[in-house]
Image (cartoon, rainbow, N blue to C red):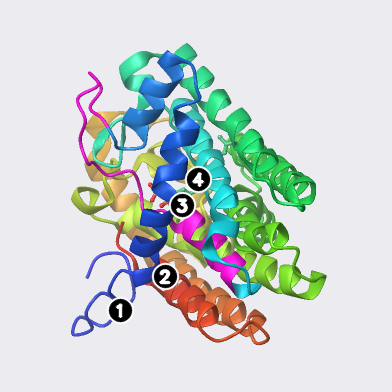
Amino acid sequence: MTATMRPAAEAAPAVPAALGRTRDTVQPALREAVGRLDETSRAISAYHLGWTEADGTPVSGNGGKAVRPALAVLSALAAGAPAETGVPGAVAVELVHNFSLVHDDLMDGDTERRHRPTVWALWGAPAAILTGDAMLALAQEVVLDSGSPHAIPAARLLSETTRRLIHGQVLDVQFEQRDDVTLPECLSMAGGKTGALLSGSAAIGAVLAGAPAETVDALAVFGEEVGLAFQLVDDVLGIWGDAAVTGKPVYSDLRARKKSLPVTYAVTHGGAKGRELAEWLAGEETGGAADEAELARVAALVESAGGREWATAEAARRVATAERALSAIPSGPREELIDIARFIVHREA
Ligand SMILES: CC(C)=CCC/C(C)=C/CC/C(C)=C/COP(=O)(O)OP(=O)(O)O
C-alpha cells in the first residue's frame, strides 16, 4: 500500500470509464484550440500536454488524468444537454489547469511532472511564463467562441474561478514564510488552489447549457468538495506516494517546507510530535538533495503526529459530502460524477 488508507487486500478502483470517454470527446477541440496559438507557445503546449516530445516528435504521452474536462462534460449531461455543449468548457478548464501547472512548476523549481522534464526546465522561465499565459488567454477565447447563448456567464464563471485559483496560490506562497498557519487557513488555501477549479469544472457545462441555478449550485458544491479531497490526496501522495507512479519527485513539498494539509494538521493537532515538526519547519539546517534520509524521518514524524490518517479520512468525508450534493442530479451523470470522486480519493498518481 502506498498513499491511501486502503486495506492491502482491496484493489485500486478502475479508472472511471467517463474519463476515457470524455477525453476522446474533448481532445479534438483541445488540439484545435492549441493550434490557434503562436508557433512557440503551440509547440511547448503540445509537449506539456503529452502530444509531442520536446523536439516536436509526435508521441502519445502522459498529458494528465483529464479529470477537469470530464467534470465539465458530465456537468452538461447533468443539465440534460448533450456532451458537446460542455466541450468548450472542458477545453477551457483543462487549459486553465495546465496554465497553473506550468507556472506552479516554475515557482516551485520542480523539474519533473507527468514522468517528463517540466517546461521551464527545458525552455527556461520566460517561455514557461508565456506558454502559461497563452493557455490562460486561450481558455477565455474558447468559451466566448462556444456559440452558446450562455457564453458570457460561462466566461464570467471561468474568470472568477481563475481569480480564486490565483488567490489560493498567493496564500500557498505566503504560507511558506509563516510558521503560524492554522488548519482552517490551510483548508481555505486548498479550497482556492484546487477546489475552485474543480468547482468551476463541475459547473461550467451546466452554465453553458443554461441550467437553473439550483443545478449549477449543486454541481459547484460537488466540485468544491471533490477539489478539497483532491488536494488532500495530492498532499498525501506528495509525501508518501511512489515517485515512479506519481511522476513527480518525492518529498518536494517537504523539501520546500510547505504547509501542506497533512503537515499543518500534524503541527496544529499532533502534540509533542507536532511541536518537533514545527521546529523542523522553522529551521534552516535541512534542504538539498543530500537530505533524503532527513526528509524520510520528517515524513515519519508527520505520520506519527496523525497528519496522514487525518488527511485520508478528511478526503473521504469530503467525497461523502460531495456525493450528497448531487441528490437532485439525474441518474447516469450522477453515478459517473460519483465514480470520478471516488477514483480521486483512491488514486495513486
Ligand atoms: C496560479 C497558479 C500557479 C496556481 C497553481 C495551483 C496548483 C498547481 C494547484 C495544484 C492542483 C493540483 C492538485 C494539480 C494536480 O492535478 P492533476 O493530478 O489532475 O494533474 P494531471 O492533469 O497531471 O492529472
Of badges 3 and 1, nearer the viewer stands 1
Residue where numbered disc 2 is placed: 345
233 shown above or below 176? below
Label 3 amino acid?
Leu
C-alpha span from label 2 to label 4: 20 Å
C-alpha span from label 4 to label 1: 29 Å
| SS class, disc 3 | helix
Q: Are marks 3 and 4 in contact (CB under 8 Å)?
A: no
Residue where numbered disc 3 is placed: 277
| SS class, disc 2 | helix
Q: Residue 196's x, y, as percent? A: 65, 53
Residue drawn at x 25%, y 22% is: 54
Of badges 3 and 4, nearer the viewer stands 4
Q: Earlier in the sequence, mark 3 or mark 4?
A: 4
Residue extent of the magenta highlight: 52-77
Q: Earlier in the sequence, mark 3 or mark 1?
A: 1
Q: Residue 329's x, y, as percent? A: 64, 82
Q: Earlier in the sequence, mark 2 or mark 4?
A: 4
C-alpha span from label 3 to label 2: 26 Å
Determine if residue 271 is in view.
yes
Label 1 amino acid?
Arg
Label 4 amino acid?
Glu
Residue where numbered disc 1 is placed: 6
Q: Are marks 4 and 1 in contact (CB under 8 Å)?
A: no
C-alpha span from label 2 to label 1: 10 Å
- The response on whether ligand 1 sits within 8 Å of label 4 is yes
Residue where numbered disc 4 is placed: 94
